[in-house]
Amino acid sequence: MENENRIWMVRAGSGGYLIEEFLQNNIVAIGWNDMGEISPDISYAELRRQYVENYSEHSDGKTNQSAGQIYRFVVEFKRGDKVVTYDSGSRNYYLGEIISDYEYNEKYEYYHTRKIKWMDQPTGRDVLNTDSKNRLGSVLTIFEISNEVWNELLTHNPARMSDEEIVIEEKKEKQEEQNDLEDIREDIESKSTEFIKDIIVKLSWQDTEKLVAGLLRAIGYKTKMTSRGSDLGSDISASPDELGLEEPRVKVEVKKRSKEKVTSQEIRSFIGGLRDFNKGIYVTTSGFSKDAKYDAERANFPITLIDLDWLVELLLNNYEKLDIETKSLVPLKKIYWPL
């Protein structure tokens, strides 16, 4: 079967429940039975008008989409075109060739039909690469398939491969799919991290302070707000106990900024205020200058500098342990990913 003609996906009903009827009767079919028999010479405008007469309750968008699919099946499909249908239960794609003109037949569940010569064996979805799977994933009843996807379906069809080739190809495709999944996962992680940053930088400085305090509580500290400043910075005291008697006693400053990095002068000022504490944490949404990092490293007290990237990392690592109020500041949903 050469791919000289157009290639079509025709869904076998919702979830592929008509797959047996398609295969046993060597057909593909579409619904919209209320349209009755349709002339193969019909124009799109006339077909759309008839569709509106029979399905007047449908929106313009649904009308245009449905009329377009019917028109393709009746008018644009040609003898010799290739066709694919999918059985979601077995995860198999069945490949065939159109061998008849449009036919109207009320003995089938879907009345609008075309005869098909099916290949002897289907192609399993699991051996396809991720790109082909995505392209075949449209929920439309009818859509056109590219030559690249068709060629891959043919390449992996058992009728065209030896047993040894099938085993080798399955191993190869499994590894390629794993690599594709890893690339997609990394892309999603990168984008989601940026979206989370977008949420955090849009918080008010008060809510940013609450977010940091909630994160410290999730890690295991008791927290207390100690001051609020006009410089968009504020202090949080943190310790293992509620009274602040146990060590470490940690002073936390949260600086909400959009552009300017924290300077060395600000770090020195922060260090100077650590008289009653033995550790310090400085959190900012804008980053730290090189000199600021240097001053923090040589301080007499351990100073931890947390920029936006690290803040997001800490948030994700401890999100399940956050209280409801803190989660509401940055609402997230867990996504499960295959290993």
Image: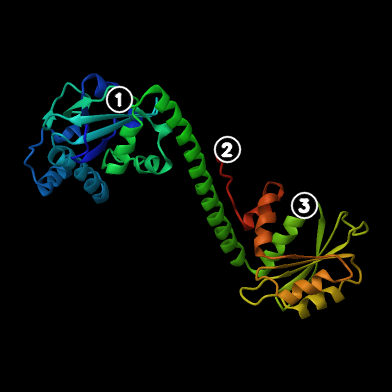
Q: Quadrant of residue 204?
A: bottom right
Residue designated by label 1? 19
Indicate the amino acid at tag 2. Leu
Judge depth for marks 1 and 2 and give the one in front: 2
What's the residue type where badge 3 is placed?
Ile
Q: Position of residue 6 (x, y in %)?
A: 20, 41
- On the question of residue 317 being in view, the answer is yes
Sort mark 3 into few (<14), some (14-19) or many (20+) by Cα contacts within 10 Å.
some
Dots 3, 1 in contact, CB < 8 A: no
Task: Write down the residue under mark 2.
Answer: 339
The CA span between labels 1 and 2 is: 31 Å
Q: Nearer the viewer, mark 3 or mark 1?
A: 1
**Pointers 3 and 2 in contact (C-beta within 8 Å):** no
What residue is pinned by disc 3? 219
Q: In the figure, is residue 106 to the left or right of 194?
A: left
Residue 218: x %, y % from top left:
75, 51
